[in-house]
Amino acid sequence: LAGCRSPDSIFIDKPAEKEHFMMKSSKALVEEIEEENTRKVQVMPRFSGCEDKDMTESERLECSNLKLVQFVYENLRYPDYARSRFIKGNVYAQFTVLKNGDLGYVRIVKDIGGRCGNTALWVINRMNFTCDKWTPGMQDGKPVDVLFTLPVKFRLE
């Protein structure tokens, strides 16, 4: 990743263990992500890592969603503040996958408090510093900006 800034040098928090996060079945998470998207285009944007030419478009999208969920839960840290107050639930983040594959206009549309929303924002912003751009959405053969909604689940065990 030559030329890339390390996300850990930009943000104060560092990712920790992921055992505090609810891990639904991959299929259920993929279905929820697809359901939450508010703008449908001919080809939806995809998280990087699923560009195998032998896959159908739907297989690429499913693979992409699975890699997205994996990225989120490998990099998400349950906030100590929320853990100490037994705060759990779903945070919904929205962002735009831009024509160039970067993420922009990141915001929380539903927060559960306890700094969980800030933690979800941190992980989403981290995606812009991994040097793996998203594959942008396509409409009529041209890249377009697409609004994407991502549910992030927090659960104490």
Image (tube, helix red, strand yellow):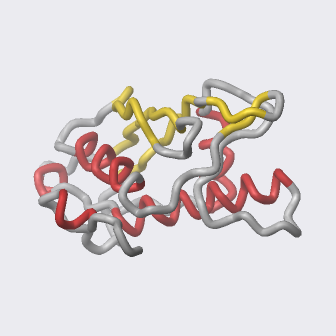
Q: Position of residue 126 (x, y in %)?
A: 34, 55
Tell me: 109 left or right of 145. left
Of residues 140 and 84, the one nearer the viewer is 140
Q: Going 39% across and 30% down the picture, which residue do you hit?
A: 105
Tell me: 15 left or right of 35. left
Label count reads 0
Q: Going 17% across and 65% down the picture, which residue do you hit?
A: 9
Tell me: 50 left or right of 133. right
Q: Position of residue 155 (x, y in %)?
A: 35, 55
Q: Position of residue 95 (x, y in %)?
A: 45, 34
Q: Name which quarter of the figure residue 90 lies in.
A: top left
Q: Is residue 28 above or below residue 23?
A: above
Q: Name which quarter of the figure residue 145 lies in.
A: top right
Of residues 129 and 21, the one nearer the viewer is 129
Quadrant housing the N terminus: bottom left
Of residues 61 and 35, the one nearer the viewer is 61
Q: Going 63% across and 42% down the picture, which residue do you hit?
A: 136
Residue at the farthest front position: 3
Quadrant housing the C terminus: bottom left
Q: Position of residue 135 (x, y in %)?
A: 64, 50
Q: In this view, does 153 lie above or below 131?
A: above
Tell me: 21 left or right of 7. right
Q: Going 37% across and 39% down the picture, which residue do you hit?
A: 91
Of residues 97 and 37, the one nearer the viewer is 97
